[in-house]
Image: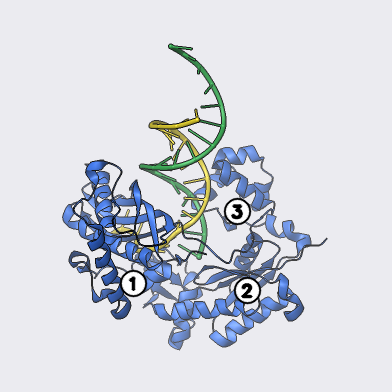
Chain colours: A blue, B yellow, C green
Amino acid sequence: METLATILHADLDAFYASVEQLLDPNLRGRPIAVGGGVVLAASYEAKAFGVHGGMSGRKARELCPQLLFVGGHFNDYQRLGDAAIAILGDFTPLVERISIDEAFADVAGCTHLFGTPADIAATIRERVRNELGLPISIGVARTKHLAKIASQVAKPDGLVVVDPAHELDFLHDLPVGLMWGVGPVTEARLKERGILTIGQLANTPGHSIERLLGRAAGEKLRSLAWNRDPRRIRTQHRARSAGAQSALGRQPAIEGVFVPAVLQLADRVASRLRAKALAGWTVTVRVRFADMRAVTRSATLEAPVAATIVLAEIATRLVRIALADHPRETVITLVAVCVSHLHKEREIQLDLPLGLPDEKWRPGACQGTARQSADRAMDLIRQRFGRDAVGYATAALDRRRSVPDAFRELAQKDLDES
DNA sequence: TCTGGGGTCCTAGGACCC
DNA sequence: TCTGGGGTCCTAGGACCC
C-alpha cells in the first residue's frame, strides 16, 4: 500500500504587509512594516534588512532607516484571510485553519476531481494570486509537519512538494529551527550539543535528547525528526482558555493603576465568554515587572465564572497577592487575566456563590441576579452600538495607549465549541 | 529606549485519596 | 507502628506558536 502526499500547508506570505502593498500600490517594492512599537509584519523588502515580526519598532528602524511604518487595515486582513482560506475550502471540507493567514488541508478525497495534490496546490496559488492579489506559499507532503516545513522552504511565493519516497532526504539536511516545537531556547540547547540539523537530531540517542529537553518534548521532536507525525487534519477546535493582557509601559505597582486595568481586562474576557455561553473554573493573573520577569497567581473556584464584576474582583485579589509576594517590585509593565477550565453553560446560573475557595475571599456584596442582568444589558447594548457604547466607568478611561480592538480580535482564536 | 496580544502544552512539586 | 505505591488535582513557571 502506498501512502500519497495529500496534505497541503498554505501560508500567505508576509501577510499584513502584503495586504498593505495590495491596498496601496505606492508601497509595492518598498520596505514596509505593519505596526508601531512592535513590528507585526514586515514586507520581504524589509526582511532583506533583517527586520521581522515581533521586533521592536526602534530596532527595525535601526536596521532599515528607510523603513516605512504603515497603519493596520485590520478589517481587510480579516476579509482577505477569510477569502484565501475559503479558496482551500472550494477543494475539500477538510481544512484546518491555524491562524488568520495559514491553514492545512487534506485533498485525498478530491484528486479525482481536481488532479494531483500538486496540481491542486498550483491552482490554489493561482487563484489566490488572481482573485485576491496576494502571494501564498504551499507545501505538499504526506504529514502535517512535513507540509508545514515544505511551505516554509517554498517561501516566498512558492510551491514545494515532498515526494514520499524521499522524505528523509528532504528533512535531514534542514536546520532544527524549522521544526515545529523548536524555538530559540531549544535551538540554543541543541546547538550546545552540536545538533544543528534535523538529521543530527534524528541520529542522537533518544535518552540524550530527553535528558536535554524533557520527556514529552524529546519524544515529540525525535518522532518528528524521523518523520513520524500522527496528527490528522482537525476541522474543529475547543477553546481551553480565554484571556486578555495589557502592556502598561512603566507604571507604579499601585491600586490606582492595576484595579482599572484588571477591570477592563476582566470585562473583555468575561464578555467574550458570555458571547459563547462559556464559563471557567480557574482564574489566572500575570504581572510583569520592570525587568520583564513575570509571575502568575491562580485560583480554582467553587463555581465557574463568566460575570465581569466577579472575574474582576477575583483577578484583583490575585494581583494583590502577586504584588504582596514581591514587595520590592515597585513598577509593573503588564497585567493579564485568563480564565481556563472552560465549560459550556447550559443555562445561565444566577445565584451561585462565586468566589475563591477560601470563605473570607467571597465577594459577598455581589448579588447574582443583579450582576447577571447588568452584564446581559451591557452585552446587548454593545451588540447593537459597538464595544465603546457602554462600559465600566474606570475601565472606559485611558484607552489611548491600548492596542486597537480590531487587532485584539484578529489575535483571538474563536472560542466556539465543536 | 527595552520587547504586543491571543493562545497551547509541559514540568515539577505538593496535597490528597485509596 | 511503619512503609509503599498509584492516581488526580492544583499551582507556578516556562517554551512555543501565530
Q: Are marks 3 and 2 in contact (CB under 8 Å)?
A: no
Label 2: which residue? A93
Q: Residue at x 20, y 48 (%)?
A: A330
Label 3: which residue? A176
Left or right of residue C6, residue A24 in this image: left
* Mark 1 Cα shell of 10 Å, populated few (<14), some (14-19), many (≥20): few
Q: Earlier in the sequence, mark 1 or mark 3?
A: 3
- The chain to which mark 2 is attached is A
For marks 1 and 2, give the one nearer the viewer: 2
Q: Position of residue B2 (x, y in %)?
A: 30, 58
Badge 2 element: loop
Work out how far the residue at label 1 is from the one at label 3, CA to CA, in angstroms.
36 Å
Residue A405's tag is 1
Q: Earlier in the sequence, mark 1 or mark 2?
A: 2
Q: Amino acid at mark 1?
A: Asp
Q: Amino acid at mark 2?
A: Pro
